[in-house]
Amino acid sequence: TDSAFLLGPWIESARRLGEGHSDCFSSILDNGDCQRFLEWNARTQITTWKPTSKESTAIPQGPVDYAAKHWFGLIRDYYARRAQLTLEQAVKDEAAGRPLNKTAMNHFR
């Protein structure tokens, strides 16, 4: 396995870049925490490519998972969990006799 395609080293590299810095500002995250900001940015770059806060109730317009990568840590920790949540929602909606609740699905992305 090439470490260039592993989530862990990618995230650690981003966090290292933020060590000792407190001048990172974002309207989405707490300002000043450069390690957290650069980790968030690194995760966004390899998944959605859309800066979206956790408090958002909907996904911004545009392609979903535009920057999706098939890296080991992403498949295991991110995509597998989303697939599980999607399946659970689909089963719940099917049992209730209704179509898939896309609003609920927004929270899984």
Image (cartoon, rainbow, N blue to C red):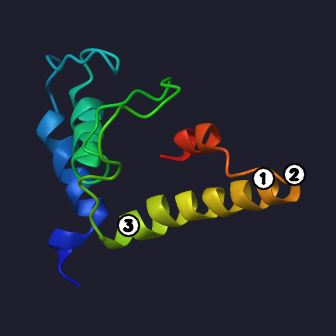
The percent coordinates of residue 36 (x first, y second) are 30, 32
Q: Secondary structure at mark 3?
A: helix
Image quadrant assignment for residue 41: top left
- Check the image and report above or below for 60 versus 96: above
Where residue 87 appears, as percent x and y from the top left, is 67, 63
Q: Amino acid at mark 1?
A: Asp
Mark 2 nearby-residue class (10 Å; few <14, some 14–19, many ≥20): few
Left or right, 103 with respect to 97, comes to: left
Pointer 3: what residue?
73
Task: Provide the secondary structure element on which disc 1 rests.
Answer: helix
**Amino acid type indicated by mark 3:** Gly
Drawn side of residue 76 relative to residue 62, left or right: right
**Which is more foreground, mark 1 or mark 3?**
1
Mark 2: amino acid? Ala
Give the mark nearest the N terminus, 2 or 3.
3
Q: Estimate the spatial distance between the alpha carbons at disc 2 and disc 3, rounded to whole Å.
A: 34 Å
Residue name at image x 27 percent, y 14 percent:
31
- Which marked residue is nearer to the observer: mark 2 or mark 3? 2
Q: Closest to the observer: 14 or 40?
A: 40
Return the x and y of residue 63 as percentages of the image width and height.
30, 47
Marks 2/1: CA–CA distance:
5 Å
Pointer 2 with pointer 1, Cβ within 8 A: yes
- From what the image shows, is residue 105 above or below residue 85? above
The residue tagged 2 is: 96
